[in-house]
Image (tube, rainbow, N blue to C red):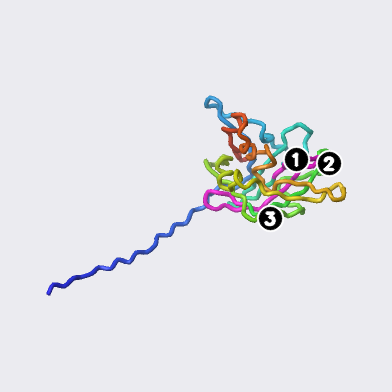
Amino acid sequence: MKKIFLYMFLIFPIITFAKSIQVRDGLYYGYWVYKDKGVLKQYGVLANNPRKDAGEYILSPVPILTATDEIYIQIKNNVPTIFFYHKNSDADLNVVGWAGAKFSGSEVIISANTIRFLKDDSKERISVGDKFNGKVVRLEIGEKAPIKEVNDKGFSIDCNQYLKANNYAETGLPNVEEPDPSGRKDILIGYPATIFAVGELGICAALLDDDVVPQIKNGWIQFRRLN
């Protein structure tokens, strides 16, 4: 009798874990850039102008009709904290805020922001790095910002990838409402809860408009290390 030997192969699932990106510690500032005939240029979707006062970078209001949206990312031990200033075109109020974040794979994830409303003529001084008290805005689904082109000088966030990762083209931007800080009764001030997309035309939200200029359509956010 022939013996038939059956060989049993145990198949173990191969589990891989996406390694989080490593970004050099430091303070980074977001510029809106695009390429024109192979030359890298800046465009006014973002302020593109980090401002220093008494040795500190600040997020205080700037004159009307000046591009004011700004994003700083401070990284310590590969943990990012985001500081931002958003212009509100629908009211005489702007948003200054900060958010704890984390790197996950090739993305930075934000689950909650702390914001404060400021008027254009506010004299309040907001320093980058100041985790002030304010209204805490929690997102049901964390805001994802895919990161690429990481080097010692900085990294980039592509708005098309950002909108796709968060499905904002289909769902719209999550909103937050705040009682009017000036005290008007029964008046709510609405504002997006996101950092990288603001209103109808702010930062990455501009790409949701089909009729945008090439400088926006073909541009991205480039974070450059300041220190």
Pointer 1: residues within 10 angstroms few (<14), some, or many (20+)? Answer: many
User: How far from the left and from the top, in percent, is residue 157?
Assistant: 58, 41
Assign a secondary structure to mark 3.
strand
136 is within the stretch colored magenta: no
Q: 84 left or right of 4?
A: right
Residues in magenta, as a range: 84-109
| Residue linked to disc 2 | 123
- Alpha carbons under labels 1 and 3: distance apart: 20 Å
Q: Residue furthest bottom?
A: 1
The secondary element bearing badge 2 is classed as: loop
Residue 88 numbered tag: 1
- Prevailing SS of the magenta stretch: strand
Answer with mark 2 or mark 1, whichever residue precedes in sequence: 1
Residue 211 in the image: x percent, y percent? 62, 31
Determine which quarter of the picture holds residue 92. top right
Could you say which quadrant of the image residue 162 lies in?
top right
Q: Quadrant of the N terminus?
A: bottom left
Amino acid carrying mark 1 in the image:
Asn
Q: Quadrant of residue 8?
A: bottom left
* 85 inside magenta stretch: yes
Q: Which residue is mark 3?
A: 138
